[in-house]
Image: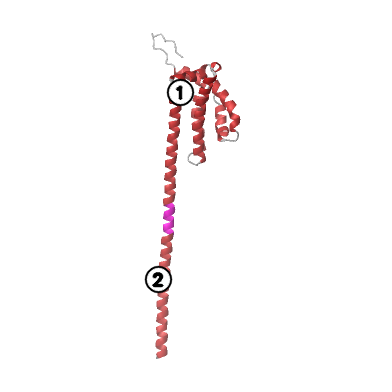
Amino acid sequence: MSEAADAQESQLEEAASERDGRRLDRINRWLTLAANLGVLLGLIVLIVEVRQNASLTRAAMDQQKNDFLAEIELNIAKPEISAIWVKAIRTPEALSDTEIQTAGSILVSVMLQWDQMFRMWEAGLISEDRVRQHIRNTAPFYFGTRFAKHWWALQAPGWEGTPMQEIAGPIVDAVDEQFLARYMDELRVPPADGVEAEPASE
């Protein structure tokens, strides 16, 4: 009887041990699942934060780009600068050395704004197509003169192998050097019927 009781007790202990083992296995599986879900949730949160940061960075740099362009236009709007800019459009051969330097500085400012677009593209914040479109939209209004095209050709060798040459170069080369002169002519409003036009002041 003693041996049978011992055997039965041993079987009960083995059964209890198996139940405990299965329960521990289930607990371990749940803990592993919970840990994996925690890692997955952490990755999702990280991805969201990275995207949010990228969006904020893109928005900030976009605003800087717009501010930069506004500063260029406000600078050109100053009467003394405007007179030089118009001279560069109409009679570039008559520019003095000081005026050449002033007109050239405007073009440098535009290129710096383009360079910011290149940096945004290289950082993965915007697409190359957007960079090209921005340059196509702005280039005629700054490089559409004989002076600007001549200035660009002299500077181009210094940008060998850079996006400025590879992307902006062909766009600027294709700009009509008479674009701004024609554009200014087209901006003139014809006189109303019966009203004699006043001579334009340069």
Residue 117 drawn above or below residue 89? below
Residue 195 drawn above or below residue 108? above
What residue type is disc 1 on? Answer: Ile
Q: Quadrant of residue 52?
A: top left
Residue extending furthest front? 98
Q: Residues within 10 Å of mark 2 (few under 14, many from 20)?
A: few
Query: At numbered mark 1, what does the secondary structure look like: helix, strand or loop?
Result: helix
Give the image location of residue 198, x and y in percent: 42, 10
Q: Which quadrant is the N terminus positioned in? A: bottom left
Which label sits on residue 47?
Answer: none
Main secondary structure along the magenta-highlighted residues: helix
In this view, the residue in front, 154 or 17, is 154
Is any part of residue 14 visible from this angle?
yes
Residue wearing tag 2: 23
Please give the name of the residue rendered at 43% of the width and 50% of the height, measured from the top-left corner. Answer: 46
In this view, the residue in front, 159 or 4, is 159
Please give the name of the residue rendered at 40% of the width and 84% of the height, measured from the top-left corner. Answer: 9
